[in-house]
Amino acid sequence: MLQLSHISKNYGKFCAVRDISLELEDGLYGMLAPNGAGKTTLIKMIVTLLYPTEGTITYDGIEIQKMGENYRDLIGYLPQQFGYYKNQSPVQYLNYLAALKAVPKEGLKEKIKALLELVGLSENADKKMKKFSGGMIQRVGIAQALLNDPKILILDEPTAGLDPKERARFRNLISSLSRDRIVILSTHIVSDIESIANQVIMIKDKKLYRKDTVANICSELDGEIFECAVPEKEFPLFEKQYLVLGARQEHGYLKVRYYDPDGSFARAGKLKEEWKPVLCAANLEDVFLVSYGDEKTEVIL
Ligand SMILES: Nc1ncnc2c1ncn2[C@@H]1O[C@H](COP(=O)(O)OP(=O)(O)OP(=O)(O)O)[C@@H](O)[C@H]1O
C-alpha cells in the first residue's frame, strides 16, 4: 500500500500542495483537477523527483526516501512530456531505456517484444518513431514505463493530444494494467477516467477534495442537475442565475443542462413551466464543472 500522510509542498513562499493524505491499493485512480491545481507536483513527490516540504510517503509501511533504489524499481512513470529520439525505433528506444534503468539483460528481447504487443505496436516495432502519431508515441511511453514491471504506474496527462479513437484504445490498455498494480492517471479530461477509474481523486485549493468511486462522487449531486428548454433571448439572464453545465442549440431555443442545488427555483415555479425542467442523473463532468465552476450571482427571472 502507498500511503501519503499530511503531504505539503512549497515552492519558496508559494504553496502548491497542502496537507494531502491518501491511501492507495491496487487499482486505477484517476486524479482529476484543473490545470495548475498541483497534480504534477504531487506525482513528482510520489516518484521521488521532489521532496515534500512536510509529511511522509510510505510504501508498505517504509518511507520511500529510505527505500532508495528499491522503491524506484517499483515505479513506472510516464511524465507529461517524455523525451525520445525520433530516429530510433521503439525497440531501439526501449533497449536504451532498459540499460538506463538497469533492467536485467536476460529475457529483455522477449520482454520488449511482449510489451510492444501489449501496447499494440508490434507491427511498428522497428520503424523510426518520427513517423508515429501522438497516440503511438504515448503507447511507446507506456511501454517504457512498464519495462521494470512496476507495482506503481504513474501517468501524467497521458492522453493530451490524442484523437478519440486513440483515447478509447488507451483507456482499455490502462484499465487492463490496473488489475495487479497501483495505477495513478492524472488528467483534467473527465472522459479519460469516468468509465475506468476505481476511484477518483479530486484536488481543489491545493487540498484533497474527494477520493471516492465515480458513483459515490456523482451521487452527491443527486436531485441537483436539471435540463430545460430556454428561449435563446432569455439565455443570457438564465446563465447569470444558474451554473450552466452544457447548452445545445435546438429550434429557436437552447436545451440547457444546469445546476440547481436544491431544485428550489424549479419547485417555486420561478422557472417558466413551458421550459419543462427535468431532473437528470449527474455525471462526472457535472461534478467537475460544479466543483471547479464559477460562483454565480443570484438574479431572479
Ligand atoms: N518549480 C516551481 N516553482 C514555482 N512554482 C511552481 C513550480 N512548479 C509548479 N509550480 C506552481 O505550482 C502550482 C501547481 O503546479 P502543477 O504543475 O503541480 O499543477 P498541475 O495540476 O499538474 O497542472 P498542469 O496540468 O498544468 O501541469 C502551479 O501554480 C504552478 O505554477
Image: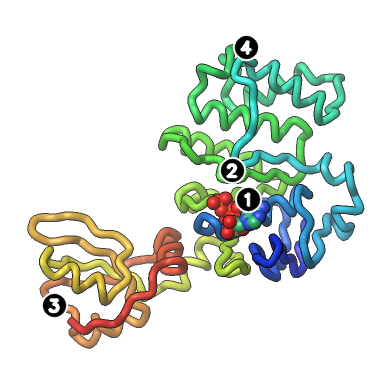
The residue that disc 4 covers is 126
Q: Mark 2 or mark 1, which is nearer the start of the sequence? A: 1
Q: Label 4 neighbourhood size at 10 Å, few (<14), some (14-19), many (20+)?
A: few
The answer to whether residue 260 is left or right of residue 277 is right
The answer to whether residue 235 is left or right of residue 136 is left
Amino acid type at mark 2: Ser
The residue that disc 1 covers is 28
Task: Label 4, secondary structure: give it.
Answer: loop
Residue found 89% across the figure and 46% down from its top: 68
Q: Label 1 neighbourhood size at 10 Å, few (<14), some (14-19), many (20+)?
A: many
User: Can residue 197 be seen at all in this image of the molecule?
Assistant: no
The answer to whether residue 66 is left or right of residue 218 is right
The answer to whether residue 237 is left or right of residue 11 is left
Q: Mark 3 or mark 1, which is nearer the start of the sequence? A: 1
The residue that disc 2 covers is 175
Q: Which part of the image, by quadrant, shows the N terminus?
A: bottom right
Task: Label 3, secondary structure: give it.
Answer: helix
